Amino acid sequence: MTPRAGAPWRSAGAATVVATALLTGCALVPPASAPPPGAGVPTAIAFGRFEFAGEALDTEWHLPAGDSAGLVLVQHGFARRCANLRTTAQRIAAHGAMTLCVDTGPVGDTAALADALAAAILHGLTAPDGRAVPPRVVVAGHSAGAAFAARVGRALAWADASRLGGAVLFDPVATRGFADNLEAIADGGRRPVYAVMAASAGCNARHNALPALQRIADTARAAGGDGFVGVELTQGSTHVDAEGEDSDWLAARVCGSPRPDHVDALRTLAARWVADLLAGTRGADAYPGRPYVDTLFAQARATPLAAAAPARQPASP
């Protein structure tokens, strides 16, 4: 949901940020009884703490059995919690990725937290089961959490561009610096940025992220590539489709109830996009011109996001 104006802010120096970024105190839960539909990797959910600026923030991980294809940040939205994206994160993990979410509730300076998290990922962060996080990283997030993920992605791109596979955004809401952070991730259209959005509404700030996505789409086209993919769900899509059954009555009352078909479409796109970004490929069919997305379009369940459409040529005089 859209963040409130005038939220409190705190600052932390870069040295303090790196020094206090530690993962502590975790608990491992047995693997899920069955993987989500469309994937076959058993997963376990684990909880821990991330210490930042004197506060211990709860973390939630989904850990695939066996080797992991990479680490995916799956960040919750404003005034939400990691539990609200639990099943979405599990769907992604069931395709072989390790996922991480940080409950950011107590934090004022989320930009400093994002930089601290990126530093920890690059310098020794371990999963609750003791595994080092994999080298390949994808940043993903919902609503204002997409803006947080973009800030993490920028820090990763600047510090070690080889580690970052790209970004996946769920109905993003732009906050300060969002466009510049996406530009750093996209790297002139050479690194993919993918987005799945709901219809324009108050909860997604009336698509206030669209101008930033348009910049990324234009840059990708100018570079002669297709580094931006955007899909907008239709027919009653809501801002909390990313949460699905993990949402709550308040979000449904404010933003509308998520429909199972939209929830499944978003999770299918997310999991397939992430799998490709971690592998550095584009082999799945979750793109315009490929069967899955073209079926969504043919059934009027989705349309190409406006930012992804080719620019209209001016009419002849």
Image (cartoon, rainbow, N blue to C red):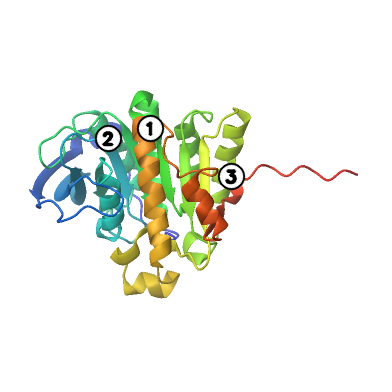
Q: Give the residue pinned by disc 2.
A: 70
Nearer to me, 175 or 315? 315
Q: Residue furthest right?
A: 317
Q: Residue at x 47, y 51 (%)?
A: 196
Earlier in the chain: of badge 3 and badge 1, it is: 1
Type of amino acid under label 3: Ala
**Pointer 3 or 2: first along the chain:** 2
* Residue nearest the viewer, comparing 183 with 66: 66
Numbered disc 2: secondary structure = loop
Q: Does residue 269 appear in the picture of this structure?
A: yes
- The residue drawn where x is 63% and y is 30% is 222
Report the Cα–Cα distance between label 3 and label 2: 27 Å
- Tell me what residue is drawn at x 21 percent, y 47 percent: 62
> Could you tell me if the residues under marks 3 and 1 are in contact, i.e. CB atoms within 8 Å?
no
Residues marked 2 and 1 touching at CB (< 8 Å): yes
Q: Three-letter amino acid code at disc 2?
A: Gly
Quadrant, the C terminus: top right
Residue 165, labelled with which disc? 1
SS type, badge 3: helix
- Determine which quarter of the picture holds residue 156: top left
Q: CA distance from mark 3 to mark 1?
A: 20 Å
Residue bearing the label numbered 3: 308
| Mark 1: secondary structure | strand
Residue neighbourhood size for the residue with mark 3, other residues' Cα within 10 Å, grouped as few (<14), some (14–19), many (≥20):
many
As shown in the figure, which amino acid type bears the numbered disc 1? Answer: Gly
Q: Position of residue 100 (x, y in %)?
A: 25, 45
